[in-house]
Image (spheres, grey):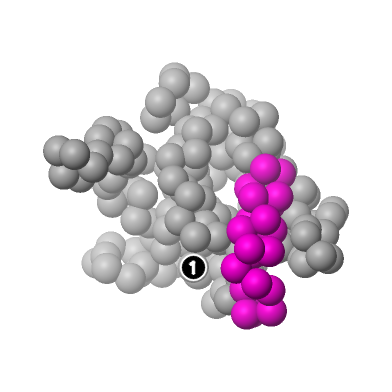
Amino acid sequence: SVLFTDIEGFSTISEKVSPEKLVALLNEYFEAVSAAVDANNGAITQFQGDAMLVTFNAIKPDPDHAANAVRCAQAIRQATQERLFGDAARMRTRCGINTGNIVTGAVGARNRLLYTVHGDEVNIAARLEQLNKQYGTYILATDSTVRAANAAGAGFAFRRVDEVVVRGRVSPTEIFTLTD
């Protein structure tokens, strides 16, 4: 399973603080969010500005990876709703979750390799994170994640949001949000 995160309104936040304060703010935020990732057996594959790419079951086996990805998104949401960061900045986080086949490994030039993940499923998770803006949601997941997360009786409550053709794809994807 793959989880993408991004901070709502980060450009507005960054416009109001110095670069030094912005880095301190991000480090404080990533510290809190990383704790949620660690607690749910995730692995942070990349930090990209204010975004994170997190994988489950890609580095170490985890038969409950989809449920752990959903739990992680819930924990991130809770961690960012309950506190302010830096000089009282609210850091609401959007998450996109997808479950499917991906490949992990080193990509790049011989002298500049980066460990990462690739595949259509990764791209879908990234697009879902972005679709949260359109739907006014904070956590979106695909039908494959919903099925896999609830297969072992986790009992997550999801609401169907839509069926969309995400940017760059031809096939539609059914998307859901957690109802808490």
Q: Where residue 79 sits: x, y (%)?
A: 76, 48
Question: Percent from the top left, x then y, of residue 107?
Answer: 22, 41
- Residue drawn at x 49%, y 68% is 130
Is residue 67 positioned above or below 98 on the image? Answer: above
- What residue lies at 19% left-to-right and 39% top-to-bottom? 111
Q: Quadrant of residue 48?
A: bottom left
Of residues 14 and 54, the one drawn nearer to the viewer in this rendering = 14
Q: Residue at x 44, y 66 (%)?
A: 163
Front-most of residues 50 and 57: 50
Is residue 17 found inside the magenta-colored segment of the image? yes
User: Is residue 107 in view?
Assistant: no
Q: Residue at x 57, y 27 (%)?
A: 41
Q: Is residue 90 above or below residue 143?
A: below
Q: Is residue 81 left or right of residue 176?
A: right
Residue 61 picture location, percent across and down? 44, 19
User: Which residue is denoted by mark 1 in the rendering?
Assistant: 130
Query: Image height check: is 149 above or below 24?
Result: above
Q: Is residue 167 visible?
A: yes
Q: Which residues are magenta?
A: 12-32
Residue type, mark 1 in image: Gln
The spot of residue 177 in percent (x, y) is 61, 58
Q: Is residue 157 above or below residue 115?
A: below
Q: Main secondary structure of the magenta part?
A: helix
* Badge 1 element: helix
Q: Residues within 10 Å of mark 1 (few under 14, many from 20)?
A: many
Which image quadrant for residue 34?
top right
Q: How many marks?
A: 1
